[in-house]
Image (tube, rainbow, N blue to C red):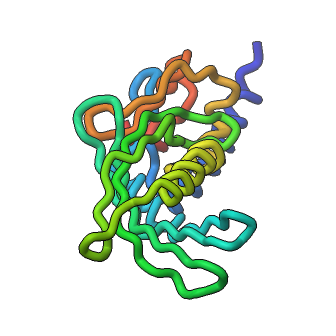
Amino acid sequence: MNARPLLSRLAACTVLIAAAVGAQAAPSVSGRQLSVGASDVQQYLDGSFPRTQDALGGLIAMTMSHPQLTLPQGNRLDLGFDVAMATAGSAPAPLGKVKLSSGLRYDAQTQGFHLDQPTVDDFTPANNGGRLDSRTRSLLNAWLTDYARREPIYKIDPTVASVLGALQVQSAQVQNGKLVVTFNQDLGKLVPAGVLGR
């Protein structure tokens, strides 16, 4: 079997990944696992917010801003947002800060980590006496469901993700302060040495 075409393809991948890594922090690879640190995820989130969601046919717009990620011990992550609401074209008024916890899933289509079954755990009102009423809570839950389905909290650079090819994802979880996805094959044999963190 001629190894030359395989080696040249591998060399091309190395060049492409090296270029991609310059633009975005590289995930770490260990065996079958690929992991991303909390600071890299936070940096990605900072570039993805604020986000505004229209509801009730455009009568209400909810804006989420200033995401704050923490990765505590256990298998769920914590995420906080400032929430503001605007009605009928008015300027957004701060509602308060929402804290949620969530599981994690990896989506091969988006090449990213997504929230999985997020739940609102706490709400700190912007004004004394403020509260999260049932209508606002239901709008927030609808936004969370849509966000978790469509938008990653961290997206692996497409060039890096392409090296993973058609590997099967076995699990995605929060582990030791990192987002970790486990594949069905040893990534060390697929990813050129020195390109990604180890």
Give the left or right position of residue 40, taking residue 183 as reference: left
Decide which of 185, 108 is in the foreground and name it: 108
At a point 62% along the width and 71% down the height, the residue shown is: 60
Residue 62 placement: quadrant = bottom right
The N terminus - image quarter: top right
Decide which of 133, 58 is in the foreground and name it: 133
Decide which of 129, 190 is in the foreground and name it: 129
Give the left or right position of residue 38, taking residue 16 as reference: left
Residue 156 in view here? no
At a point 56% along the width and 56% down the height, the residue shown is: 139
At a point 71% along the width and 71% down the height, the residue shown is: 58
Residue 87 placement: quadrant = bottom right
Residue 57 placement: quadrant = bottom right
At a point 34% along the width and 59% down the height, the residue shown is: 68
Give the left or right position of residue 161, taking residue 38 as reference: right
Residue 75 in view here? yes
The C terminus - image quarter: top left
Q: Position of residue 30 (x, y in %)?
A: 39, 27
